[in-house]
Amino acid sequence: MRAKRVYLAVLGLAVLTILAVVFGSLGGAGRGDGREEAMNPQETGKPMNSEHQEDWLLEPLYKVNSHKDLVYATKENEHGRQESLALDIYEPLQEEAASRPLILFIHGGGFNSGDKRDAEAIAEEWVSRGYVVASANYRLRVSPQADMKGTIADAIEDMGDALAWLKDNQESYRIDTRYTAVGGDSAGGQLAVTFASRYKAVEEEDAPRLFAVIDIYGPLFRGEITENYPSTLIIHGTEDQLVPYEQSVRLFDMLGAANVYRQLVTMEGGGHSYQDPKVWEQVVQSTTHFLRNAITASQQIFLPEDTELGAFAGEYAQLQLLRQAFFVETSGQLQAKLPKGWELVGQTAFSSGENAEVQVAIPEDAASGVYPVRIGTDQSGSLPLTLYIKVKDRLSYERTVFYNAGEQQLHTNLSIKNSYPTALQGKVTIRYQDSEGSRVESYELKSIQPGAVKKLTMPFYSEEAPVVVYENSAGAVLQETSLMTYVYAAEKRTGPLTIDGSLEDWRRDYPFPLNGESQLHMKEYAGADDLSGQGYVAWDEEYVYLALEMKDDRHVQQETAFGIYMGDSVQFSLRLVDQSGTPQGVHEFGVALHENGSPANFRWLAPPEFRPGKVHAMKTGISRSNDQTVYEIALPWAELGVAAPTEGMHLKFSLLVNDNDGQGRKGWIEYNSGIGYKDANAFGDLFLVNKRN
């Protein structure tokens, strides 16, 4: 084995195991190795104008090129066999010839699953801004909890090998490993934190060095944090059911006790998936701004206490700036680049030895959204600090679709709450889709006091996710909100269905779509021929029926039982809704067609009275012809605990179709969220009707 230019110091570590679940004050700022080590735009490309310099590593300016399956090491795995370990490199297509900073990303998966391809989406975001991203596989184990110490040691060693390989090949891919960030999600987040704690750069001038760590809901780290630990960003959701949010709070406190520059970004309502659409923009923005500040930290007089600030329009966003130790004697004047109409207020002059505190005044007519802010000084030679302000939504909405028994139709209640500190008035416009096409309905808001709720009852429902637009009295659009979920009205069957993988006896007038961009959660998607289709739901007294017509260019299913979700398959979830409108326990099922032509099914989740495993009473017919797969399912109502289904019955519903083209699970396309990201509150609505109107 060739000699490495890096080594890992062994520290004691007690590790919390994540089991894989289906579906899915600033002494340490920078690297602690001196301000002369900071990277700047001139080192990473041809000369830029001042505006381009300010946007360095912030704006998505570049197309992305990838190099896949590059073997960086061959190691003995837990079975005693030699295993080739590979990484994928994503790089920006740039005319500039100089090297770029590196992000080494480590995938999650409970140490027994996951793949380097899982990072494709976030890698493309970072690469479009000027980084090179390497996403590396590492040795996994069937039962990592049986030897967590060995599992962690193998993975950390593999990441050291990956970084050494990247150092050896940095000229080929125009990487400057002296400016390396390491990050990961879940188990990968824990590995990133651990790797940084054990990493020691040798004294060679061109040795790899770490300037930042990105920990996305990694489980609790119990090692040692020292003052020279890299700047660290922690991201965690408050509704994470796998790794408690409090574990990231404890890591944040550990870093603070060691005088390390760190931030904790909270995904309010977020679960154990940073790629969930409801938190995705927050993840992209927080990592982008934090990394830019970290890589330039040793040139900065201050660093922001928080990269993410939130405030309402008409308010002041409070900005705390923390003094860097090596600029303790510097004084001067703060300057800001702000959106039009915004203003920097407060004490903008700063004296030596002090932190700084200023406010950003947000105009009352600022629309909800994310706004970048640049904070600089009158000192020459340094790039401005960067952060963003999220202007909060003035209104929050709760949509409830219900069955009107008298009219035998579905209607909608929309509750509109004023979250703003003063009264609001204006107009709310609802854009929605029904069986006859696009519709627009507008409602006047005369006045809603702070905290008050206005309720609208509308004699219609939207099959697709409606969009609600709020305009003030002057006609300015201040907020646009998608209500996210789909609603489906399932007709009652008038005759029996034959479950044979053919839909000839189905009425197919009202399909639900599986072809929208917002429904895709997939790596390397190649268009409609890769995976797309439509589905149907029907019912009778004995069964709820599901049918799908899917175009899929390649069918791969080699898994059994619990693991069928890893191949081409369907997963669907149902929750009964009681008379008070409260959803009950989650039932999650799946079906698949093996390559030998035999169907399979599995129940992953269920209330306590049901057992996970094969559902013998479920009827499944699946056929495959050319690039078309037809799924047909009959699930007995008894498997949901329903004795007698009735018209108007309400269930929560979500469905996804997994895709595997021979290189592992690529991802899925979904009708309503909540399965892939395990958030039962994201399910849509399913109603039983005798006849659709």
Image (tube, grey):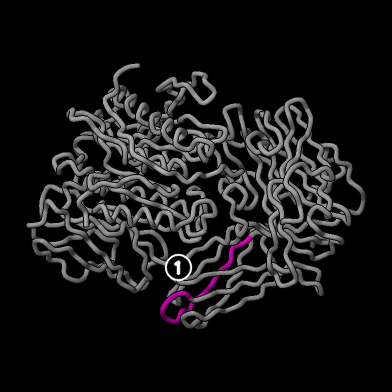
User: Is residue 434 in sight in this rendering?
Assistant: no
Measuring from the top left, give residue 146's x and y in whole percent.
54, 36
Residue 71: in magenta span: no
Q: Nearer the viewer, residue 559 or 510?
A: 559
Q: Residue at x 28, y 56 (%)?
A: 256
Question: Which secondary structure dominates the residues rendered in magenta?
Answer: strand
The type of residue carrying mark 1 is Asp
Q: Is 503 placed left or right of 531 in the picture?
A: right
Q: Is 485 placed left or right of 509 in the picture?
A: left
Read off the residue under disc 1: 393
Residue 427: in magenta span: yes
Q: Which residues are magenta?
A: 419-432
Q: Nearer the viewer, residue 11 or 648?
A: 11
Q: Is 199 placed left or right of 83 in the picture?
A: left
Q: Quadrant of residue 254?
A: bottom left
Q: Residue at x 21, y 54 (%)?
A: 26
